[in-house]
């Protein structure tokens, strides 16, 4: 979340970056789905569907996609007819931060087949992989490392351009 907050600070004034959390998304359960899509899922789907692009910030757990994040994406594809509304042709960028040395490169690579399956338009103009994040953010979650801040600024500017030229 700290990386997303830093991105929101660095985005151009004519662009809005809305930050959403997946904390309220329940564990996927077809029995729950049969009773109706949870309100937290519906609200997030509506926010994504009304956006011009989707910036995903992923951690990396055990060299791959975090299960809770994949669970949220799975919910966002329910019912299947909503995949087109939420994801199809939507510009998507992926970034990540971790205290480890790999900087989420394996998680970002693992997301590619998922993004392809959903029919998104991933932006490959740049890659933002933040290693040693525990040393780059202060205790309040503010990005204090200037080289990382400059990389992030270039990353969000590139994604903004991709979104603008995609419409």
Image: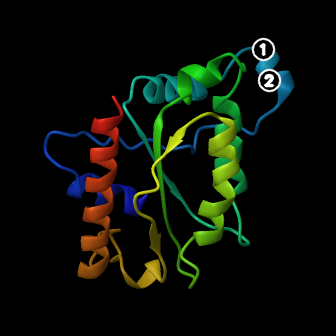
Residue beneath label 2, please? 32
Which numbered circle lies on residue 24? Answer: none
Q: Picture coordinates of residue 117 (x, y %)? A: 69, 38
Instruction: Give above or below for 72 relative to 125.
Output: above
Residue 67: give x, y in percent of width and height.
Answer: 73, 54
Q: Position of residue 112 (x, y in %)?
A: 64, 52
Whether residue 145 is visible: no
Classify the position of the N terminus by image quarter. bottom left
Looking at the image, the residue that sits furthest to the left is 13
User: Mark 2 falls on what kind of element?
Assistant: helix
Quarter of the C terminus within the rendering:
top left
Q: Quadrant of residue 116?
A: top right
Residue beneath label 1, please?
35
Residue 70 position in % (x across, y down)? 69, 47
Q: CA distance from mark 1 to mark 2?
A: 5 Å
* Left or right, 157 with reference to 139: left
Q: Is residue 47 found left or right of 74 in the rendered image?
A: left
- Vertical relation: 106 (above or below) 32: below
Q: Residue at x 36, y 80 (%)?
A: 136
Dot 1 and dot 2 residues touching (CB under 8 Å): yes
Q: Residue sitting at 38 percent across and 44 percent down?
A: 19
How many neighbours does mark 1 have within 10 angstroms: few (below 14), some (14-19), or many (20 or more)?
Answer: few
């Amino acid at each position: 979340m700290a990386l997303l907050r830093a991105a929101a600070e660095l985005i151009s004034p004519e662009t809005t970056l809305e930050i959403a959390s997946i904390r309220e998304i329940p564990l996927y359960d077809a029995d729950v789905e049969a009773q109706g899509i949870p309100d937290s899922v519906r609200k997030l789907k509506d926010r994504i569907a009304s956006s011009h692009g989707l910036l995903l910030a992923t951690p990396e757990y055990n060299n791959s996609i975090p299960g809770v994040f994949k669970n949220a994406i799975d919910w966002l594809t329910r019912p299947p007819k909503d995949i087109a509304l939420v994801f199809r042709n939507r510009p998507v960028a992926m970034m990540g931060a971790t205290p480890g040395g790999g900087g989420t490169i394996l998680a970002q690579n693992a997301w590619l087949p998922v993004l392809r399956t959903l029919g998104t338009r991933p932006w490959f103009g740049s890659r933002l992989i933040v290693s040693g994040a525990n040393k780059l953010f202060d205790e309040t979650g503010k990005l204090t490392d200037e080289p990382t801040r400059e990389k992030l600024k270039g990353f969000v500017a590139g994604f903004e351009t991709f979104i603008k030229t995609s419409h």
